[in-house]
């Protein structure tokens, strides 16, 4: 499967190009510097040159708090530019896989969100990603995969932050306990994206790893593995006010994904073990 990966130097983009090449696919990963997705002509040039069968859009403006201040910028990249990506895919008859987020939901539910649940983003980031979804889905046969709480090699993420705080030598870590979601390991998401593309999945599909946990629970598992003496104290969201409100509950229902893949989604704890192994941090 000849693939073009936009946002190819981001955390997910790197995992996707690695997994595609591991499977023996020709994969071209392009960074923002060479393929800014807001530049339709540039995208047109790249699809003509590479002639991909699949276009994966991993490019996004992912600074959730900054999006609140930079609404136009967020909508330009996460929204309008997705139409350029779809047009480029259409130009060469390629399939499109676009990545979205659990932030399209309000985050106030008490059970997992299925694909058809009502969207109600509480942040500019979520609003802009929802706009991007609609533009991707307007392209016939597009697949839009919503994911949550990504962590993995080569990117800024919660697990990397916790490891940095551990290395700083703090005796106690204070981590919010009243936000529940599902950490998702980028190499597992990358494999799922390629598998979903291979079975011809279209429309909306949710992907996350199991089982749901709070940020405090996730941090505790990291600490248990690399700094068992460290105290991880639960605190409430109100102690960490942020410009963009974070969802209290944003677990995605993965029933459709599991049916398409014919297997359960992977466990984030296994992903965490692999992540720490790759960083030479296992105990
Ligand atoms: N991280 C999460 O927890 C999370 C959760 C759910 C869904 N997602 C979604 O998953 C996807 C991948 O996220 P990620 O965590 O891999 O993010 P990431 O590490 O921030 O990667 C995004 C990449 O997009 C690039 N980019 C930004 N603006 C661009 C533009 N105009 N043209 C081309 N490339 C551009 C960035 O390049 P620069 O660094 O040079 O700007 C970066 O390399 C995104 O769609 C995101 O919305 C992420």
Image: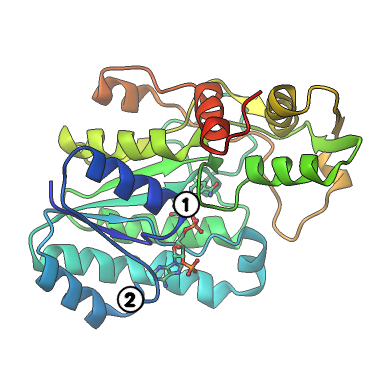
N-terminal of the pair, mark 2 or mark 1, is: 1
Q: Is residue 181 above or below residue 126?
A: above
Q: Residue at x 69, y 37 (%)?
A: 248
Q: In which quadrant of the rendered view does residue 225 lie?
A: top right
Label 2 crowd (10 A; few <14 / some 14-19 / many >=20): few
Disc 1 secondary structure class: helix
Disc 2 secondary structure class: loop
Furthest toward the top, the residue is 263
Q: In which quadrant of the rendered view does residue 86 lie?
A: bottom left
Q: Is residue 55 above or below residue 20?
A: below
Q: Residue 34: which disc? A: 2
Give the Cα distance between marks 2 and 1.
Answer: 17 Å
Q: Residue at x 32, y 80 (%)?
A: 39
Q: Is residue 59 above or below residue 241?
A: below
The residue closer to the viewer here, 155 or 183, is: 155
In the rendered image, residue 196, in percent from the top left (x then y), is placed at 24, 35
For ligand 1, tell me if the residue under mark 1 lies within 8 Å.
Answer: yes
Residue 271 is left or right of residue 8, and the answer is right
Q: Residue 233: which disc? A: none
Which quadrant: the C terminus?
top right
Furthest toward the right, the residue is 171
């Amino acid at each position: 499967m000849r693939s073009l990966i936009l946002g190819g130097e981001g955390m997910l983009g790197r995992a996707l190009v690695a997994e595609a090449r591991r499977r023996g696919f020709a994969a071209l990963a392009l960074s923002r510097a060479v393929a800014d997705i807001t530049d339709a002509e540039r995208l047109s040039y790249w699809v003509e040159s590479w002639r991909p069968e699949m276009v994966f859009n991993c490019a996004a403006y992912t600074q959730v708090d900054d999006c609140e201040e930079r609404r136009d910028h967020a909508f330009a990249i996460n929204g309008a530019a997705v139409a350029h990506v779809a047009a480029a895919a259409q130009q060469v008859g390629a399939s499109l896989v676009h990545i979205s987020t659990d932030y399209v939901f309000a985050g106030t539910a008490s059970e997992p969100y299925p694909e058809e649940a009502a969207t109600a983003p509480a942040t500019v980031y979520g609003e802009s990603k929802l706009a991007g979804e609609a533009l991707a889905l307007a392209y016939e046969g597009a697949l839009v995969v919503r994911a949550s709480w990504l962590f993995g090699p080569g990117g800024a993420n919660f697990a990397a932050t916790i490891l940095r705080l551990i290395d700083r030598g703090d005796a106690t870590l204070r981590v919010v306990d009243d936000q529940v979601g599902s950490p998702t390991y980028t190499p597992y998401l990358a494999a799922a994206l390629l598998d979903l593309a291979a079975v011809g999945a279209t429309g909306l599909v949710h992907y996350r790893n199991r089982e749901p946990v709070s940020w405090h629970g996730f941090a505790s598992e990291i600490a248990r593995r690399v700094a068992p003496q460290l105290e991880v104290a639960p605190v409430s969201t109100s102690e960490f006010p942020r410009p963009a409100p974070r969802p209290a509950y944003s677990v995605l229902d993965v029933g459709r994904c599991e049916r398409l893949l014919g297997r359960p989604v992977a466990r984030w704890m296994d992903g965490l073990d692999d992540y720490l192994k790759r960083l030479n941090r296992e105990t």
